[in-house]
Image (cartoon, rainbow, N blue to C red):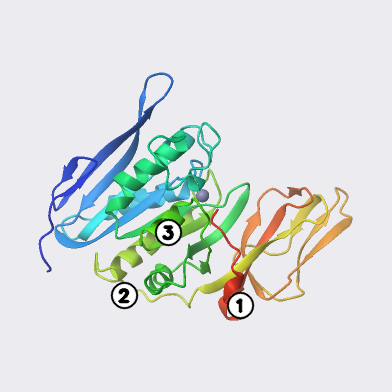
């Protein structure tokens, strides 16, 4: 059965082995004087094992991950768990309260890492998250959705150059796995700097609960927990291998108008295929969107009314068709 687990202490709160404890970490006061906390649930397994950190809503309007984390915490049993689950369903509590990606000062938390105790509110929140929570983790999964009116096919973004991360990324079982470069001052860049292996899940769009996205996310967490030895591995066979992408780019509108798409997230497309058209209001074609290479559509604009330069379709290229130095993706 492995050795007995010890008491875990998070932000000064002890969590005995075999118990699940809610911890509220104070971060700041609103102008009303109300104290704002980051809510955390620590599920400390009875048996020794790795510490897995699940986090969501670093962008406050990205809700699918909030529900993914909730469902995992509801079903995990501390008596049979090996290791510890640290669940932070809402990291950016300020953005979550105002249904916004950002903090009240319009800063993006995922561009404010690793943060500092004396910086902007975003910087302080990043610092608190890293010093009080991330510092405990042996492995991390962070949940996002498409941003700016875009939707993403459920996908894992990770550093596929790292063997441990790559195996876990494939094990997650999302339909797409994308090698994504690190963006400066992101959580993922900070995790990489600390040697913390991390998967970033992207699925669906902001301000929605999307059942299929949530199902894939929850199943993925269970699979990774099995892979890490935290629970018995699943017997369910992996669906036919994911589309493993080495790079991708947004195909943009060359004219403004209404975008009529012929393809949807998850579709495989061939070089030269017409993926959609930008029309005027009477249906006269202004521009065609043609696939520049064989690949898979992994993201799409949601609102058809587009302006010149808007990203319409996010097209990923299979890693076997890529030169390794050409990765262009960053996290949404
Ligand atoms: Zn996000």
Q: Tell us which disc is closer to us: 2 or 1.
A: 1
First reached walking from the N terminus: tag 1 or tag 3: 3
In depth, the one of 238 and 245 nearer the eye is 245
Reply above or below: 296 against 284. Answer: below
Q: Secondary structure at mark 2?
A: loop
> Can I make out residue 314 in this image?
yes
Q: Residue at x 33, y 51 (%)?
A: 134
> Can I make out residue 212 in this image?
no
Which labelled disc corresponds to residue 235?
2
Image quadrant in which the N terminus is located: bottom left
Labels 2 & 1 near each other (Cβ < 8 A): no
Q: Position of residue 203 (x, y in %)?
A: 51, 56
Q: Which residue is mark 3?
A: 217
Q: Is residue 325 left or right of residue 44?
A: right
Distance in Å between CA atoms under marks 1 and 3: 29 Å
- Local crowd at mark 1 within 10 Å, few (<14), some, or many (≥20)? few
Q: Which residue is mark 1?
A: 323
First reached walking from the N terminus: tag 2 or tag 3: 3
Reply above or below: 237 against 113. Answer: below
- Local crowd at mark 3 within 10 Å, few (<14), some, or many (≥20)? many
Labels 1 & 3 near each other (Cβ < 8 A): no
In depth, the one of 28 and 195 nearer the eye is 195
Q: Position of residue 176 (x, y in %)?
A: 52, 68
Q: Position of residue 113 (x, y in %)?
A: 45, 47
Q: Tell us which disc is closer to us: 1 or 3.
A: 1
């Amino acid at each position: 059965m492995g050795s007995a687990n010890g008491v875990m202490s998070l932000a000064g709160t002890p969590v005995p082995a075999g118990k699940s404890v809610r911890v509220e970490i104070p971060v700041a006061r609103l102008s009303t004087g109300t104290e704002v906390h980051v809510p955390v649930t620590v599920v400390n397994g009875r048996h020794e094992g790795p510490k897995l950190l699940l986090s969501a809503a670093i962008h406050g309007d990205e809700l699918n991950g909030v529900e993914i984390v909730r469902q995992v915490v509801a079903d995990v049993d501390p008596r049979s768990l090996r290791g510890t689950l640290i669940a932070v369903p809402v990291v950016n509590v300020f953005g979550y309260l105002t249904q916004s990606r950002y903090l009240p000062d319009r800063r993006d938390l995922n561009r404010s890492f690793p943060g500092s105790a004396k910086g902007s509110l975003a910087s302080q929140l990043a610092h608190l998250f890293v010093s009080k929570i991330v510092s405990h983790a042996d492995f991390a999964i962070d949940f996002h959705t498409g941003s700016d009116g875009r939707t993403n096919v459920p996908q894992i973004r990770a550093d596929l150059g790292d063997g441990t991360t790559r195996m876990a990324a494939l094990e997650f079982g999302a339909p797409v796995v994308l090698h994504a470069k690190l963006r400066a001052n992101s959580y993922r860049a900070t995790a990489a700097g600390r040697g913390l292996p991390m998967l970033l899940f992207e699925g669906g769009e902001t301000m929605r609960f999307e059942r299929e996205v949530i199902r894939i996310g929850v199943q993925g967490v269970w699979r990774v927990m099995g892979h890490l030895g935290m629970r018995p591995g699943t017997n369910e066979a992996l669906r036919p291998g994911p589309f493993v992408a080495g790079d991708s780019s947004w195909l943009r509108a060359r004219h403004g108008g209404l975008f009529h798409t012929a393809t949807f997230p998850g579709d495989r497309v061939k070089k030269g295929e017409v993926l959609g058209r930008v029309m005027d209001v009477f249906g006269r074609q202004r521009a065609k969107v043609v696939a520049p290479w064989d690949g898979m559509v992994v993201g799409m604009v949601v609102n058809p009314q587009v302006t010149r330069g808007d990203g319409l379709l996010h097209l990923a290229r299979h890693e076997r068709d890529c030169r390794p130095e050409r990765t262009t993706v960053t996290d949404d």
